[in-house]
Amino acid sequence: MIEAKDVSCTFARNPFSKEGFMAVSPVSIQFIDGERYAIVGESGSGKTTLARMIAGLQRPTTGNIYVDGMPVYGKHKVHTNYFKEVQIIQQDSSSALDPKMSVGRSIEEPLLCFFHLDKGERKKRCHDLMDLCNLPVEYYSRLPAELSGGEQKRVAIARALAAEPKCLIFDEATNGFDLPLRKKIIEEIVDLQRKLAFTLIFITHDMELAVVIADVILVMRNSTLIEQVEFSGDISVFTSEYSKTLLYASGITDT
Ligand SMILES: Nc1ncnc2c1ncn2[C@@H]1O[C@H](COP(=O)(O)OP(=O)(O)OP(=O)(O)O)[C@@H](O)[C@H]1O
């Protein structure tokens, strides 16, 4: 289980000011292994900052993240095994891939870091991951620039899965794609989650996606977690006015 205990994040308003701006107000959440979560809220509500704290990429100003009871942020650094356990696919997948690194090398890099596999075993595992993520094996030697946006996203997913993470965070990962591709990538990620049973944390603006994907929906507004609901199809579980506004804006309700 991954647990956020009283985590908050404050940034300086500007480099010359000591005045702080709270991007995430103190929040405590538990992420049970193998469940699907959506963090939903408008732009600037703090979703990415919360995701980055969970991923070990942004030290909380207060509180800590725990994996099976072990703190992620030590006094000086993040416990390195955590980078294997939790993988994040950020909004811009092209920048997540090294432009000079082939698809094969990109996917094999985590295999090299985290597992003792010989060259042949790595290549076989890489082919399996490409297959799992609907990437033709002929793409093994291609560079990111020789792929479409959707294919780059699939490489980022395969690379993340190469680490065999216990949790995958998917941040607005289909932004900028047309609707059919967006739908397809989301179906693929949910399908992968069902097959591999990792914990999925899906970050989105879109309540319509959240209700399709998640077992648990966390609603954020103005840096604050305002509602957390277990969702199994009944929208009456949402009680906050803001959640109702998001449901309306997504066309799920008409009042
Ligand atoms: N490194 C940073 N330094 C200063 N301010 C930051 C930093 N990262 C984020 N912020 C600010 O924190 C607030 C929350 O940003 P965050 O990216 O977490 O929101 P979000 O809900 O993910 O938005 P979006 O959906 O647009 O990505 C914003 O006002 C943003 O400008």
Image (cartoon, helix red, strand yellow):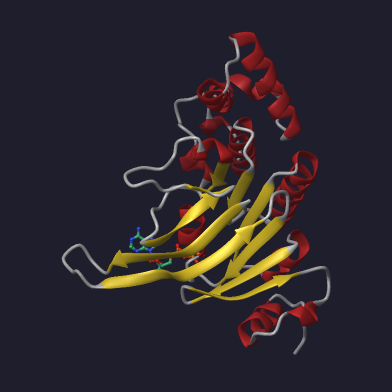
Q: Quadrant of residue 85?
A: top right
Q: Look at the picture and state if 203 lies above or below 120.
A: below
The count of marks equals 0
**Residue at the right extreme of this rendering:** 233
Residue 57: horizontal and vertical position, in percent? 43, 48
Residue 7: horizontal and vertical position, in percent? 45, 63
Q: Quadrant of residue 192?
A: top right
Asked whether 152 or 228 is in front, the reply is 228
Please indicate whether residue 76 sits to the left or right of residue 170 in the image. Answer: left
**What residue sits 68% from the left and 83% below the top?**
244
**Residue at the front extreme of this rendering:** 69
Quadrant observed for ligand 1 in the rendered image: bottom left
Q: Look at the picture and state if 216 lies above or below 82.
A: below
Asked whether 177 or 203 is in front, the reply is 203
Q: Is residue 173 visible?
A: no
Please indicate whether residue 166 sits to the left or right of residue 237 in the image. Answer: left
Residue 183: horizontal and vertical position, in percent? 74, 54
Locate the C terminus and report the quarter of the image it occupies.
bottom right
**Residue at the bottom extreme of this rendering:** 255
**What residue sits 67% from the left and 79% below the top?**
249
**What residue sits 62% from the left and 46% below the top?**
168
Q: Is residue 179 visible?
A: yes
